Amino acid sequence: MKIAIVDDEQKWRNLALNVVRDYTDEADEIEVFNSGVEFLERNAEYNIVLMDIDMPEMDGFETIVNYKAEHLESIIIILTTHLDCARKGYLVDAFRYVDKTKMKVELKEAFEKVREINIKNSFSLTAKSGSETKSILLRDILCSIVNI
């Protein structure tokens, strides 16, 4: 997995990085950013983005809106101490809203849920047509039943 941590405060970046390392594998890539602007300039796609909300220059909500315009499939986890703006998380399709002061417990739950989703989304069917073999994720199969 590719994971991004975006927070303007070093204290919270370091804590998030340490907590995330506890719930990921060595093969996972973790990148850390000091601002939403720096994150967007990287122009990379991540499986999971941990986003602070209260940042100078560009807040987390604006950063998420800009990022999601290009990367719809990414899972966004909002990190904040400002619990009063939790409702805004729904407007940007956030996966979880994590209280920074409870980060260890709440990120553990979030990563466990992400693992469940990843396992569910990895089931596929394999089909062969001539010499070509193709795997199709079950989540990408649409079925329509029509009564005649």
Image (cartoon, rainbow, N blue to C red):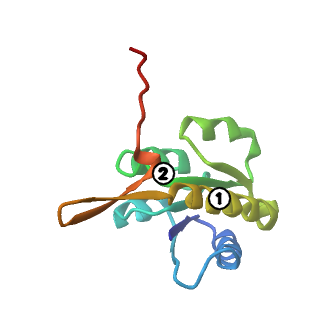
Q: Nearer the viewer, residue 77 or 6?
A: 77
Q: Is residue 85 above or below residue 135?
A: above
Q: Is residue 76 above or below residue 29?
A: above
Say what secondary structure mark 1 lies in. helix
Query: On the image, numbered disc 1 is attached to which residue?
Result: 116
Quarter of the rendering containing residue 10:
bottom right
Residue 139 picture location, percent across and down: 47, 47
Q: Amino acid at mark 2?
A: Met
Q: Amino acid at mark 1?
A: Glu
Q: How many marks?
A: 2
Residue positioned 63% across, 63% down in the render: 115
- C-alpha separation, residue under disc 1 versus residue under disc 2: 32 Å
Discs 1/2, front: 1
Q: Nearer the viewer, residue 148 or 7?
A: 148
Residue positioned 39% across, 59% down in the render: 40
User: Which of marks 2 and 1 precedes in the sequence?
Assistant: 2
Quarter of the image where the C terminus is located: top left
Quarter of the rendering containing residue 15:
bottom right
Say what secondary structure mark 2 lies in. loop
Q: Nearer the viewer, residue 1 or 123?
A: 123
Q: Are marks 1 and 2 in contact (CB under 8 Å)?
A: no
Instruction: Looking at this view, name the residue that lies furthest to the bottom.
Output: 26
Bin the neighbour count of mark 1 within 10 Å (Cα to Cα): few under 14, some 14-19, many 20 and up.
few
Query: On the image, numbered disc 2 is attached to which residue?
Result: 58
Residue 92 picture location, percent across and down: 53, 40
Residue positioned 73% across, 48% down in the render: 82
Instruction: Looking at this view, name the residue that lies furthest to the top.
Output: 148
- Does residue 133 appear to the left or right of 110 in the view shown? left
Bin the neighbour count of mark 2 within 10 Å (Cα to Cα): few under 14, some 14-19, many 20 and up.
few
Q: Nearer the viewer, residue 144 or 5?
A: 144
- Does residue 66 appear to the left or right of 121 in the view shown? left
